[in-house]
Amino acid sequence: MPSTRSLVLIPSQLCTAAVWEHQIRTLSGAVGVSVANQRDSDSMDGLASRILEVAPPRFALAAHGMGGFVAFEMWRQAPARIERLALIGTLATPDSPAQIARREGYTKLVREGQFARVIEERVPILFSERSRANERLLAIARAMAESTGADAFLRQQSAIIGRPDSRPALATISCPTLVMLGDQDRITALSDAQAIAGAVPGARLEVVQDSGHMVPLEQPDQTTALLTAWLDR
């Protein structure tokens, strides 16, 4: 049985609890699982503070994509409360000028009423080549994005653009840490995952085969197995 009693899951941008469906269903019998709200603030500081306000006193924290940016901020604010950390498809660096320009382009389209176009542009690049032919997975991604909504997406973009460089904090992370990445992730590079795992003392890196950025959805069994082993460490 896991020594950790509470697990907080943070979805990525335009994702909801549905991205964690398999993990919630499988792990809930062993730990208390909750899914964080990553929609209601336009800054990482605000998102982290709000999640910490409602989180258990001590908890394991698993985060996907943008959720990893929030997790780094939570560690800066309350390291003693985080028992262990799992980071899936995320990076510690701030946005480059090119990345900021791309996000500002998305923001402009959404403000012009073209949120649906943004969804359709983003969804295919989130998945591996094989998963892009899986209409069930694509439908889940579209439904999560539509449920998130345009206003929350704009807040998320603002928070992502304004996030700090998390690399200086990596060496201070003293809890058991798992870093995961899909081998076909087109959002996060292998070098990003390697940099995190190399800087966090004792961190373990797992590259999940046949998966793009949406590892918990594309490879749910393997994701859950890796998280279970991480909870048992």
Image (tube, grey):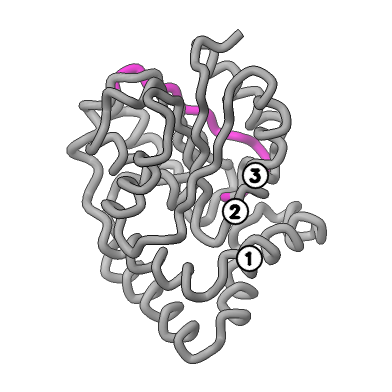
Up/down of 151 relative to 126, above or below: below
Disc 2 marks a residue whose amino acid type is: Thr
Kind of residue indicated by mark 3:
Ser
Disc 3 from disc 1: Cα separation: 24 Å
Query: Residue 69: in sight, yes or no?
Result: no
Disc 1: which residue: 147
Q: Quadrant of residue 143?
A: bottom right
Give the class, few, some or many, for how many residues have Cα within 10 Å of label 1's Cα (few <14, many ≥20): few
Q: Is residue 172 visible?
A: yes
Give how far across and how far down residue 202 sits, in percent: 34, 17
**Left or right: 69, with 123 as reference point:** left
Picture disc at residue 223? none
Q: Position of residue 76 (x, y in %)?
A: 23, 37
- Crowd tier of the residue under label 3, counting other residues whose Cα lies within 10 Å: few below 14, some 14–19, many 20 or above: many
Q: Which residues are magenta?
A: 201-213
Q: Disc 1, disc 2: CB below 8 Å?
A: yes
Residue identified by numbered label 2: 16
Between 64 and 131, which is closer to the camera in this rendering?
64
